[in-house]
Amino acid sequence: MPKVRYERSGAAAVLTIDRPERRNAVDGETAGLLLDGYRRFEAVDEARVLVLTGEGPEAFCAGADLQAIAEAAANPELADRATVERPEGPMGFTRLTPTKPAIAAISGWCLAGGLELALWCDLRIATETARLGYPERRWGVPLIDGGTQRLPRIVGLGRGLDLILTGRIMGASEALDWGLVNEVVAEGGHLERALELAEEIAAFPQPTMLSDRRAAHEGLGLPIAEALALESELGAASIATGLEGATRFAGGQGRHGEGAGV
Protein backbone atom coordinates (compact mmCIF):
# COMPACT_ATOMS: atom_id res chain seq x y z
CA MET A 1 0.00 0.00 0.00
CA PRO A 2 1.44 3.43 -0.93
CA LYS A 3 2.39 5.71 1.95
CA VAL A 4 0.77 8.69 0.21
CA ARG A 5 -2.41 8.73 -1.87
CA TYR A 6 -3.18 11.31 -4.56
CA GLU A 7 -6.85 11.51 -5.52
CA ARG A 8 -9.14 13.95 -7.29
CA SER A 9 -12.44 15.08 -5.79
CA GLY A 10 -14.25 17.67 -7.88
CA ALA A 11 -12.05 20.74 -8.18
CA ALA A 12 -9.73 19.52 -5.42
CA ALA A 13 -6.70 17.29 -5.34
CA VAL A 14 -6.54 15.32 -2.09
CA LEU A 15 -3.12 14.31 -0.80
CA THR A 16 -3.34 11.81 2.06
CA ILE A 17 -0.46 10.60 4.22
CA ASP A 18 -1.31 6.92 4.74
CA ARG A 19 0.83 5.65 7.62
CA PRO A 20 -1.68 5.43 10.48
CA GLU A 21 0.45 2.82 12.24
CA ARG A 22 3.12 5.55 12.62
CA ARG A 23 0.63 8.36 13.28
CA ASN A 24 1.26 9.40 9.68
CA ALA A 25 4.86 10.33 10.44
CA VAL A 26 6.97 11.14 7.38
CA ASP A 27 10.03 9.10 6.43
CA GLY A 28 12.18 9.65 3.37
CA GLU A 29 9.96 7.66 1.02
CA THR A 30 6.85 9.45 2.27
CA ALA A 31 8.50 12.85 1.79
CA GLY A 32 9.34 11.94 -1.79
CA LEU A 33 5.76 10.82 -2.44
CA LEU A 34 4.40 14.05 -0.95
CA LEU A 35 6.62 16.03 -3.31
CA ASP A 36 5.40 13.93 -6.25
CA GLY A 37 1.79 14.58 -5.26
CA TYR A 38 2.41 18.31 -4.94
CA ARG A 39 3.92 18.40 -8.43
CA ARG A 40 0.93 16.52 -9.85
CA PHE A 41 -1.38 19.09 -8.29
CA GLU A 42 0.60 22.01 -9.70
CA ALA A 43 0.65 20.47 -13.18
CA VAL A 44 -3.14 20.18 -13.55
CA ASP A 45 -5.14 23.40 -14.03
CA GLU A 46 -8.42 21.64 -13.21
CA ALA A 47 -7.10 20.86 -9.72
CA ARG A 48 -7.74 24.29 -8.23
CA VAL A 49 -7.24 23.55 -4.52
CA LEU A 50 -4.99 21.08 -2.71
CA VAL A 51 -6.40 19.36 0.37
CA LEU A 52 -3.72 17.83 2.59
CA THR A 53 -4.77 15.29 5.22
CA GLY A 54 -3.77 12.18 7.12
CA GLU A 55 -5.35 8.73 7.11
CA GLY A 56 -7.58 7.95 10.05
CA PRO A 57 -8.86 9.98 13.00
CA GLU A 58 -5.81 9.62 15.27
CA ALA A 59 -3.35 11.89 13.47
CA PHE A 60 -2.99 14.39 10.68
CA CYS A 61 0.77 13.95 10.90
CA ALA A 62 3.02 13.44 13.94
CA GLY A 63 6.02 14.95 12.15
CA ALA A 64 9.15 13.36 10.79
CA ASP A 65 9.63 9.68 11.52
CA LEU A 66 12.33 10.03 14.17
CA GLN A 67 12.89 6.27 14.26
CA ALA A 68 13.75 6.31 10.55
CA ILE A 69 16.02 9.32 11.05
CA ALA A 70 17.82 7.61 13.96
CA GLU A 71 18.37 4.50 11.86
CA ALA A 72 19.71 6.63 9.01
CA ALA A 73 22.08 8.43 11.37
CA ALA A 74 23.44 5.08 12.52
CA ASN A 75 23.78 3.84 8.94
CA PRO A 76 24.68 6.63 6.45
CA GLU A 77 24.03 4.27 3.54
CA LEU A 78 20.29 4.24 4.23
CA ALA A 79 18.26 6.19 1.69
CA ASP A 80 16.20 7.77 4.48
CA ARG A 81 19.11 10.09 5.17
CA ALA A 82 17.79 12.09 2.21
CA THR A 83 14.85 13.18 4.39
CA VAL A 84 16.87 15.88 6.14
CA GLU A 85 18.83 16.82 3.01
CA ARG A 86 15.91 17.31 0.60
CA PRO A 87 16.22 20.85 -0.91
CA GLU A 88 12.45 21.15 -1.37
CA GLY A 89 12.06 20.56 2.39
CA PRO A 90 12.62 17.54 4.64
CA MET A 91 8.86 16.91 4.85
CA GLY A 92 8.55 16.89 1.06
CA PHE A 93 7.65 20.35 -0.27
CA THR A 94 7.76 22.79 2.63
CA ARG A 95 10.33 25.08 1.00
CA LEU A 96 8.20 25.48 -2.10
CA THR A 97 5.30 27.90 -2.51
CA PRO A 98 2.14 26.62 -4.19
CA THR A 99 0.62 28.75 -6.92
CA LYS A 100 -2.89 27.67 -5.89
CA PRO A 101 -4.67 27.48 -2.53
CA ALA A 102 -4.06 24.62 -0.10
CA ILE A 103 -6.17 23.48 2.85
CA ALA A 104 -5.06 21.24 5.71
CA ALA A 105 -7.78 18.88 6.97
CA ILE A 106 -6.63 18.02 10.50
CA SER A 107 -7.79 15.30 12.86
CA GLY A 108 -5.96 14.30 16.02
CA TRP A 109 -2.23 14.85 16.38
CA CYS A 110 -0.71 17.65 14.32
CA LEU A 111 2.78 17.86 15.72
CA ALA A 112 6.31 18.97 14.86
CA GLY A 113 6.82 18.64 11.10
CA GLY A 114 3.13 17.80 10.80
CA LEU A 115 2.26 21.24 12.14
CA GLU A 116 4.80 22.71 9.73
CA LEU A 117 2.96 20.97 6.88
CA ALA A 118 -0.34 22.41 8.12
CA LEU A 119 1.17 25.90 8.35
CA TRP A 120 2.35 25.57 4.75
CA CYS A 121 -1.32 25.50 3.75
CA ASP A 122 -3.42 28.64 3.36
CA LEU A 123 -6.27 27.41 5.57
CA ARG A 124 -6.61 24.81 8.32
CA ILE A 125 -9.78 22.91 9.21
CA ALA A 126 -9.48 20.93 12.46
CA THR A 127 -11.65 18.52 14.39
CA GLU A 128 -12.40 18.97 18.08
CA THR A 129 -9.83 16.25 18.78
CA ALA A 130 -6.96 18.13 17.11
CA ARG A 131 -3.78 18.69 19.14
CA LEU A 132 -1.12 21.00 17.73
CA GLY A 133 2.39 21.87 18.81
CA TYR A 134 6.16 21.50 18.55
CA PRO A 135 7.05 18.73 21.04
CA GLU A 136 10.42 18.19 19.34
CA ARG A 137 11.65 21.05 21.54
CA ARG A 138 12.22 18.49 24.32
CA TRP A 139 14.44 16.33 22.07
CA GLY A 140 16.48 19.12 20.56
CA VAL A 141 15.20 18.59 17.02
CA PRO A 142 15.17 21.89 15.06
CA LEU A 143 12.29 23.35 13.09
CA ILE A 144 13.52 23.25 9.49
CA ASP A 145 10.27 22.97 7.50
CA GLY A 146 9.15 26.58 7.89
CA GLY A 147 7.87 26.35 11.45
CA THR A 148 9.85 29.31 12.80
CA GLN A 149 8.77 31.52 9.89
CA ARG A 150 5.17 30.64 9.08
CA LEU A 151 3.80 30.30 12.62
CA PRO A 152 4.62 33.92 13.68
CA ARG A 153 3.24 35.19 10.37
CA ILE A 154 -0.08 33.51 11.14
CA VAL A 155 -0.52 34.08 14.89
CA GLY A 156 1.97 36.88 15.65
CA LEU A 157 5.47 36.76 17.09
CA GLY A 158 4.50 36.57 20.76
CA ARG A 159 2.15 33.65 20.36
CA GLY A 160 4.43 31.99 17.85
CA LEU A 161 7.30 32.09 20.32
CA ASP A 162 5.03 30.61 22.98
CA LEU A 163 4.81 27.38 20.99
CA ILE A 164 8.35 27.52 19.60
CA LEU A 165 10.03 28.02 22.99
CA THR A 166 7.86 25.89 25.26
CA GLY A 167 7.02 22.95 23.01
CA ARG A 168 3.58 22.80 24.59
CA ILE A 169 0.67 21.20 22.80
CA MET A 170 -2.61 23.10 22.42
CA GLY A 171 -6.13 21.93 21.76
CA ALA A 172 -8.42 22.85 18.92
CA SER A 173 -10.37 25.49 20.84
CA GLU A 174 -7.28 27.48 21.77
CA ALA A 175 -5.89 27.09 18.25
CA LEU A 176 -9.13 28.56 16.89
CA ASP A 177 -8.94 31.48 19.33
CA TRP A 178 -5.39 32.19 18.13
CA GLY A 179 -6.30 31.98 14.45
CA LEU A 180 -3.96 29.02 14.09
CA VAL A 181 -6.88 27.04 12.68
CA ASN A 182 -9.70 28.66 10.71
CA GLU A 183 -12.56 26.34 11.67
CA VAL A 184 -13.23 23.56 14.17
CA VAL A 185 -15.66 20.83 13.17
CA ALA A 186 -17.01 17.68 14.79
CA GLU A 187 -14.86 14.56 14.79
CA GLY A 188 -14.78 13.02 11.32
CA GLY A 189 -15.99 16.16 9.55
CA HIS A 190 -12.64 17.73 8.67
CA LEU A 191 -12.19 16.31 5.17
CA GLU A 192 -15.79 16.90 4.15
CA ARG A 193 -15.59 20.53 5.27
CA ALA A 194 -12.22 21.05 3.58
CA LEU A 195 -13.61 19.70 0.30
CA GLU A 196 -16.69 21.89 0.63
CA LEU A 197 -14.49 24.92 1.16
CA ALA A 198 -12.31 23.90 -1.78
CA GLU A 199 -15.34 23.86 -4.08
CA GLU A 200 -16.39 27.31 -2.85
CA ILE A 201 -12.93 28.72 -3.57
CA ALA A 202 -12.76 26.96 -6.95
CA ALA A 203 -16.07 28.51 -8.01
CA PHE A 204 -14.73 32.07 -7.82
CA PRO A 205 -13.15 33.75 -10.88
CA GLN A 206 -9.66 32.32 -10.67
CA PRO A 207 -7.40 35.08 -12.08
CA THR A 208 -8.33 37.66 -9.45
CA MET A 209 -8.50 35.15 -6.59
CA LEU A 210 -5.02 33.86 -7.44
CA SER A 211 -3.52 37.33 -7.90
CA ASP A 212 -5.01 38.54 -4.60
CA ARG A 213 -3.67 35.46 -2.84
CA ARG A 214 -0.24 36.03 -4.34
CA ALA A 215 -0.29 39.68 -3.29
CA ALA A 216 -1.12 38.71 0.29
CA HIS A 217 1.68 36.12 0.46
CA GLU A 218 4.38 38.12 -1.31
CA GLY A 219 3.45 41.47 0.20
CA LEU A 220 3.73 40.25 3.78
CA GLY A 221 6.87 41.69 5.30
CA LEU A 222 7.43 44.31 2.59
CA PRO A 223 7.32 48.01 3.44
CA ILE A 224 3.74 49.18 2.90
CA ALA A 225 4.60 51.27 -0.18
CA GLU A 226 6.26 48.29 -1.87
CA ALA A 227 3.42 46.00 -0.86
CA LEU A 228 0.83 48.36 -2.34
CA ALA A 229 2.83 48.63 -5.54
CA LEU A 230 2.93 44.82 -5.76
CA GLU A 231 -0.82 44.64 -5.16
CA SER A 232 -1.40 47.18 -7.94
CA GLU A 233 0.88 45.36 -10.35
CA LEU A 234 -0.71 41.98 -9.76
CA GLY A 235 -4.24 43.39 -9.78
CA ALA A 236 -3.69 45.09 -13.13
CA ALA A 237 -3.03 41.72 -14.74
CA SER A 238 -6.54 40.52 -13.86
CA ILE A 239 -8.45 43.77 -14.27
CA ALA A 240 -10.46 42.36 -17.17
CA THR A 241 -11.88 39.69 -14.89
CA GLY A 242 -12.75 42.36 -12.34
CA LEU A 243 -14.54 44.51 -14.90
CA GLU A 244 -16.54 41.51 -16.07
CA GLY A 245 -17.54 40.78 -12.47
CA ALA A 246 -18.53 44.40 -11.87
CA THR A 247 -20.74 44.24 -14.95
CA ARG A 248 -22.47 41.11 -13.65
CA PHE A 249 -23.00 42.74 -10.25
CA ALA A 250 -24.49 45.84 -11.90
CA GLY A 251 -26.85 43.49 -13.70
CA GLY A 252 -28.11 42.09 -10.39
CA GLN A 253 -25.91 39.04 -9.84
CA GLY A 254 -24.23 38.36 -6.51
CA ARG A 255 -26.09 40.95 -4.47
CA HIS A 256 -27.00 40.42 -0.80
CA GLY A 257 -24.16 37.90 -0.47
CA GLU A 258 -25.52 35.54 -3.12
CA GLY A 259 -22.74 33.37 -4.50
CA ALA A 260 -20.27 34.83 -2.02
CA GLY A 261 -19.06 31.39 -0.96
CA VAL A 262 -17.17 31.94 2.27
Image (cartoon, grey):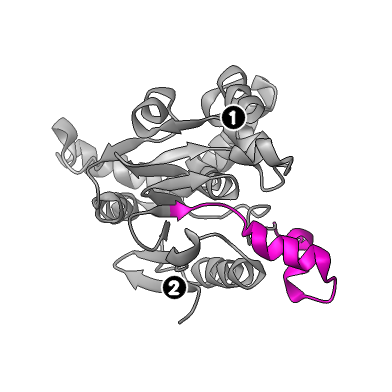
Identify the residue at image location x=44%, y=24%: 178
Image position, residue 233 (x, y; %) = 60, 39
Query: Mark 2 — residue?
Result: 6
Name the residue located 55 percent from the left edge and 59 percent from the top edge.
25
Judge whether 44 appears above or below 99 on screen. Answer: below
The answer to whether the residue labelled 2 contacts the one labelled 1, judged by CB atoms less than 8 Å apart, is: no
Badge 1: residue crowd in 10 Å (few <14, some 14–19, many ≥20): few
Say left or right for 213 vs 192: right
Name above or below for residue 135 compared with residue 44: above
Residue designated by label 1 = 153
Q: Quadrant of the N terminus?
A: bottom left
* Displayed quadrant of residue 226: top right
Q: CA distance from mark 2 to mark 1?
A: 29 Å
**Is 190 left or right of 144, judged from the image as shown?**
left
**What is the magenta range?**
60-89
Front residue of this view, candidates 165 and 224: 165
Q: Position of residue 81 (x, y in %)?
A: 77, 67
